[in-house]
Amino acid sequence: MEKLKKILSNLPHPVRWALVMVLGFVLLGMGLVMMVTPGPGLLFIFFGLSILALEIKWARELNQQGMQGLERIVAKLKSIFGKKNKGETN
């Protein structure tokens, strides 16, 4: 994502805004379509929101909430699998 920010920072603002909107909404739309067809829908939705978050506040907030939820899930999984590994002795 940092590479994308660096590339986009060199463009004039109207061009950058248009590019981010088109790319972000295309990925978001593809992700929504893939939710009912075979494909990585959630991944495309996340990528689309991440790109839109570069220019739009609501996408930034939604992306932040998603990241916090993902962090909670990862922490919960680590605690579950960490307990199983600690209980095993060889």
Image: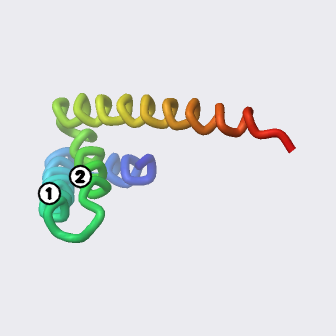
The image shows residue 85 at horizontal and vertical percentages of: 71, 39
The image shows residue 80 at horizontal and vertical percentages of: 56, 34
Residue 80 vs residue 61: left or right?
A: right
Distance in Å between CA atoms under marks 1 and 2: 7 Å
Question: Which is nearer the N-term, disc 1 or disc 2?
Answer: 1
Q: Which of 69 and 82 is in front in this view?
A: 82
Q: Quadrant of residue 58?
A: top left
Are the residues flagged by discs 1 and 2 in contact, CB closer than 8 Å? yes
Q: In which quarter of the image is residue 53?
A: top left
The crowd level at tag 2 (other Cα within 10 Å; few <14, some 14-19, many 20+) is many
Residue 86 vs residue 22: left or right?
A: right
Q: Quadrant of the C terminus?
A: top right
Is 8 situated above or below 39?
A: above
Residue 3 vs residue 52: left or right?
A: right
Please say which color scheme the image uses: rainbow
Q: SS of the residue at dot 1?
A: helix
Instruction: Tell which residue pokes out farthest to the right in this image.
Output: 90
| Residue denoted by label 1 | 32
Q: Residue at x 27, y 53 (%)?
A: 42
Q: Which of 37 and 59 is in front in this view?
A: 37
Is 90 situated above or below 29?
A: above
Q: What residue type is labelled 1?
A: Leu
Is 87 situated above or below 50?
A: above
Q: Which dot marks residue 45? A: 2
Q: Which dot marks residue 53? A: none
